[in-house]
Amino acid sequence: MPNRCARALPRLLLPVLFALATASTPAAEPVATVRVAFDRAGVTATQATGLADIAAQRAVTADDPVRIASISKLVLAIGALRLAEDGQLDLDADVSDALGWTLRHPQHPDVPITLRLLLSHRAGLTDAAGYWQVPLGGEFRTLLDDPRAWDADHAPGTFFRYANVGFPLVAAVMERTTGERFDLLMQRLVLAPLGIAGCYNWESCDDATAARAVVLYDAGRAPVRDDLQGRKPACGVTPAADGRCDLSRWRAGANGGLFSPQGGLRISANGLAKIGRLLLGDGEVDGERLLSADSVRMLVTPLWTLAPGNGIGHEEDSGNGEARAFFCRYGLAAQTLATPDPACGDDPFGDGIARVGHAGDAYGLKSGLWIDRDAGTGVAYFATAVDPPPAGRHSAFTAVEEALARGEAAAASPVAGDGPGD
């Protein structure tokens, strides 16, 4: 690890912090961890440990935006449901009409693909042909000409296969329906009404937010994402084939992956807590109603539950082939934990409570947003530089995630963070 200033040392006792969760298993030391507990009324406890930026020796806080990975999907779903409530989207309509071209599984051309299937990873798609590489000015649909983009063995609606590629298609439908660029649309639908300083990729964030970016690191502590050095990047999207980054080339629905709807949301742990409180409040938080209670129930209700032969219980793109399933119940971009099945390892809390939310995993980051709707409580967390991740003791989640979920990590640290507060 790089040397750290004496002022930061008391906050970086993470080998001790995670020893309780990993017992005799050697644990990697994250560069930063943040955990925010909350209930319907507000934040109840905050812990922030480590550095948002090693080179700048900047301590991480619960207000610092981080690339939160797949929790981005859950926030996207909130925006999509807002449009559905307004009558602009139909979750069960063939998305081909909105896209302006026909989306069909090559082996099942008579089966319409809908937003409900895309949001629940049951559209017959795979990530094998990619989903991130289409440049500014390109056409996302060209990826789907590759046979590897499709699950040749299963028709849409019959099988769960976690596929990031479906979410750029959802974003494209949202763009074509509204005529608005996806990142700006999500500002209007979700982030701005909730007062969250966040953005999908960096273009729609302000300079002050970008200056607080949490850097993501690999196992060698080399920056791999968001080493912004205090300023917004010159280009917040994949540049055009000629290297230019002229966003006037954007065309509604042409490239729904441009602003990384599947994983590119930059948001703080406090911002995630606000999302969690929205769901705890049946679509209302701090006097702001975004969704109806019926829409929230639809969002979190599982559409798929693991059974023999009906799905794959882990993300193939991550290379994690856990002995027990990571995904066992899934709704509209919402994962339900603690499935009572011996094949399932989806309980990082270890208490059997069926919390709802989503996990995130990318570029050495592990993250989670989980709510207990019955108890009215929740937790948001992330850790950086968890690579390679030490295995969990009682679930298919990592030891770091188990510790943050249960609060053990914060309890073990003598100087854990900033204390309770909004």
Image (cartoon, helix red, strand yellow):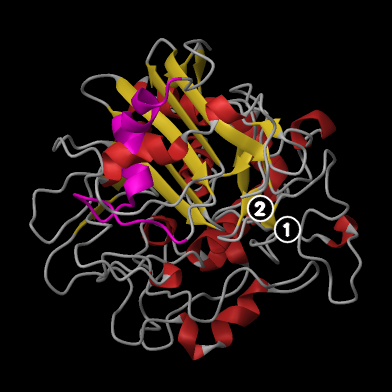
Of residue 299 and residue 179, the one placed in the foreground of this image is 299
Q: Magenta segment, which residues?
A: 388-414
Label 2: which residue? 175
Element on which disc 2 rests: helix
Count all numbered tags in the image, as a single digit.
2
Residue 300 seen in this snapshot: no
Say above or below: 308 vs 335. below
Q: Residue 47's spot in the image, x, y percent? A: 47, 23
Amino acid identity at mark 2: Glu
Q: Residue at x 38, y 29 (%)?
A: 379
Q: Is residue 365 magenta?
A: no
Residue 346 seen in this snapshot: yes
Of residue 205 and residue 422, the one placed in the foreground of this image is 422
Of residue 114 and residue 29, the one placed in the foreground of this image is 29
Q: Residue at x 12, y 61 (%)?
A: 343
Label 1: how many residues lie within 10 Å, few (<14), some (14-19) or many (20+)? many
Amino acid identity at mark 1: Ala
In this rendering, position of residue 329 left or right of residue 255: left
Label 2: how many residues lie within 10 Å, few (<14), some (14-19) or many (20+)? many
Numbered mark located on residue 252 in the image: 1
Residues under numbered marks 1 and 2 in contact, where contact means CB atoms less than 8 Å apart:
yes
Q: Residue at x 59, y 59 (%)?
A: 218
In this rendering, position of residue 281 left or right of residue 202: left
In this rendering, position of residue 125 left or right of residue 328: right
